[in-house]
Image: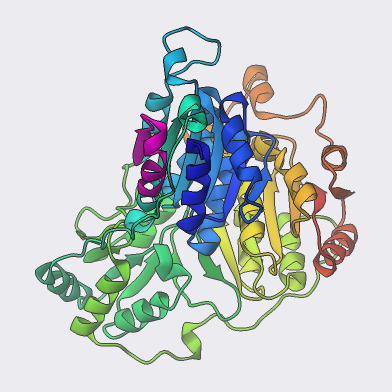
């Protein structure tokens, strides 16, 4: 038995069942060890950003850690952007990064890089295996770290010789340590603050897609407090039957109005809200300067215990039908394409309990009003703001939930970052429908330029914002990756294409010219 074999057996013994991979030469002994264990599902992604994005989506929908297989520092660098998103989503991800044999590192080989430095820049836990005999123990600790504090990024660096040299046996990951809790005094202070008229409880994490949300609603309703969620979250419930929770906006100007005049803002499972960027003449945070900010429970703490402790202080009011989103599906839209109409048709046709991965960027605001009227579904958003999240995240969600329809709302510019994920969808037969909004550019950058006070756009700016000349052909791109695709320019075409996609299994792509 060698180090690589003890690594695979440790992962399996510790409950890790999926490995999203893009291997290289340094990982060949690990690949061989994986090949001896068909019970580990290995999924090839053609770009490392697809690997990390898929592991993120998998965790969001299962709460279980997947492994990634990445090739040295450059491969990890390619995965970095979606690891950033995963970190902001509080997703547990276990990276296995191969490295040169330790005795080879003194030579300046072409792929030599700062594996520790790049790993530590985004990981909560990083370790280099020092010998083959320690691989199993290190792997077990890595699994434990990825599961700790509600989900972390853990990176185990595996020098090639520690994979091929002799080792003894596997190990089993210990349970993560108990989550930290606020003190009784802190809970009482937060409860007193929530008794004030107009107070706000802001929640995130599992409270947005589990019964903890019901508890949060009951305890805030007891004293008439407002219940809110951040705009960008790892997962939340929307549509018919979902709990009514106020959602913050993208623009800080809108959030200043939402939070104005609140006597207190209690945070449970989330951090203090901040503007996506800084803007001239605007504050960095939208909470009212007169508001008392109470950071009761961070995302890394015990959210469930904290909400139960608050309910013991405040009591709980009965929920009624008015606390939930009613059944109100819109009719199919007709005529020329608009984003609002596309949202109506998606809401009309999307089945119950779908998973929507939202990277529509500027289109999303126009789609959202109608999607709130769709059948109940889960929504995954781009928590870290690093584009190229949507397609690979959908891969992970579809692997996690093979019996649920996955719908990706994707901008054409952001989709180009990780379009290789279409190939993985095709190879794995994943039930993912991708809707590409082809506005031929980075529309969000036009809006951000205006938000900075610049209203005139010249040739250089335009050529950096537009993706025209040539126009991207998403039908050809999808078909080249093995995915059936169609382009639509009116609502009749969209309705037919989306209805067909919802009625059949397997990957589909619809390019909406807008």
Q: Which residue is drawn at 67% across and 18% down?
A: 459
Relative to 145, residue 477 above or below = above
Residue 499, x across and y down, in percent: 84, 67
Asked if one can make out residue 454 in the rendered structure from this viewpoint, the answer is: no
Depth order, front residue of 113/32: 32
Residue 2, x across and y down, in percent: 50, 36
Tally of numbered tags: 0
Tell me where the magenta segment starts and ends, as one range: 124-141
Residue 189, x across and y down, in percent: 13, 70
Relative to 457, residue 241 above or below = below
Does the magenta portion include 35? no
Q: Residue at x 41, y 44 (%)?
A: 136
Depth order, front residue of 31/245: 31
Does the magenta portion include 127? yes
| Colouring chosen for the image of the structure | rainbow
Q: Which residue is drawn at 41% across and 80% down?
A: 214
Return the residue found at the far left: 185
Q: Which residue is drawn at 81% across and 59% down?
A: 506
Return the residue found at the far top: 108
Indicate left or right for 348 with 382 as reference: right
Indicate left or right for 5 with 208 as reference: right
Depth order, front residue of 29/98: 29
Relative to 114, residue 27 above or below = below
Asked if one can make out residue 131 in the rendered structure from this viewpoint, the answer is: yes
Residue 436, x across and y down, in percent: 75, 47
Relative to 261, residue 289 above or below = above
Depth order, front residue of 439/77: 77
């Amino acid at each position: 038995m060698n180090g690589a074999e003890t690594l695979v057996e440790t992962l399996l013994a510790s409950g890790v069942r999926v490995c999203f991979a893009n291997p290289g030469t340094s990982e060949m002994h690990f690949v061989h060890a994986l090949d001896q264990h068909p019970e580990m599902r290995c999924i090839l992604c053609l770009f490392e950003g697809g690997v990390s994005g898929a592991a993120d989506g998998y965790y969001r929908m299962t709460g279980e850690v997947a492994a990634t297989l990445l090739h040295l520092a450059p491969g990890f660098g390619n995965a970095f952007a979606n690891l950033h998103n995963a970190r902001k989503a509080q997703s547990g991800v276990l990276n296995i990064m191969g490295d040169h044999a330790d005795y080879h590192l003194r030579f300046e080989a072409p792929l030599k890089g700062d594996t520790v430095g790049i790993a530590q820049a985004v990981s909560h836990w990083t370790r280099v295996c020092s010998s083959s005999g320690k691989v199993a123990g290190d792997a077990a600790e890595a699994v434990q770290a990825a599961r700790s504090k509600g989900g972390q990024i853990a990176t185990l660096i595996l020098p090639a010789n520690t994979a091929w040299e002799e080792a003894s046996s596997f190990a089993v990951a210990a349970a993560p340590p108990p989550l930290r809790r606020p003190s009784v005094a802190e809970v009482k202070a937060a409860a007193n603050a929530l008794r004030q008229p107009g107070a706000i409880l802001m929640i995130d994490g599992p409270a947005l897609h589990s019964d903890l949300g019901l508890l949060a609603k009951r305890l805030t309703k007891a004293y008439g407090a407002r219940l809110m969620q951040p705009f960008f979250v790892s997962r939340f419930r929307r549509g018919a039957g979902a709990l009514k929770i106020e959602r913050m906006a993208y623009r800080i100007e809108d959030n200043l109005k939402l939070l104005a005049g609140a006597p207190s803002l209690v945070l449970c499972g989330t951090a203090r809200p901040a503007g996506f960027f800084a803007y001239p003449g605007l504050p960095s945070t939208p909470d009212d300067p007169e508001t008392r900010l109470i950071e009761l429970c961070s995302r890394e703490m015990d959210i469930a215990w904290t909400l139960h402790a608050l309910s013991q202080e405040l009591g709980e009011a009965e929920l009624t039908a008015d606390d939930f989103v009613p059944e109100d599906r819109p009719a199919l839209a007709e005529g020329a394409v608009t984003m609002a109409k596309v949202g109506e048709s998606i809401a009309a046709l999307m089945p119950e309990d779908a998973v929507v991965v939202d990277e529509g960027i500027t289109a999303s605001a126009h789609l959202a009003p109608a999607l709130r009227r769709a059948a109940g579904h889960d929504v995954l958003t781009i928590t870290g703001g690093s584009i190229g999240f949507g397609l690979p995240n959908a891969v992970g969600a579809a692997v996690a939930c093979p019996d649920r329809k996955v719908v990706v709302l994707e901008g054409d510019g952001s989709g180009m970052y990780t379009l290789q994920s279409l190939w993985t969808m095709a190879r794995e037969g994943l039930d993912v429908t991708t809707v590409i909004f082809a506005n031929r550019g980075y529309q969000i950058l036009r809006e951000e330029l205006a938000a900075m006070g610049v209203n005139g756009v010249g040739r250089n700016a335009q050529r950096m914002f537009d993706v025209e000349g040539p126009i991207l052909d998403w039908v050809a791109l999808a078909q080249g990756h093995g995915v059936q695709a169609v382009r639509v320019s009116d609502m009749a075409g969209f309705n037919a294409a989306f209805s067909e996609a919802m009625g059949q299994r397997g990957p589909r792509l619809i390019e909406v010219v807008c």
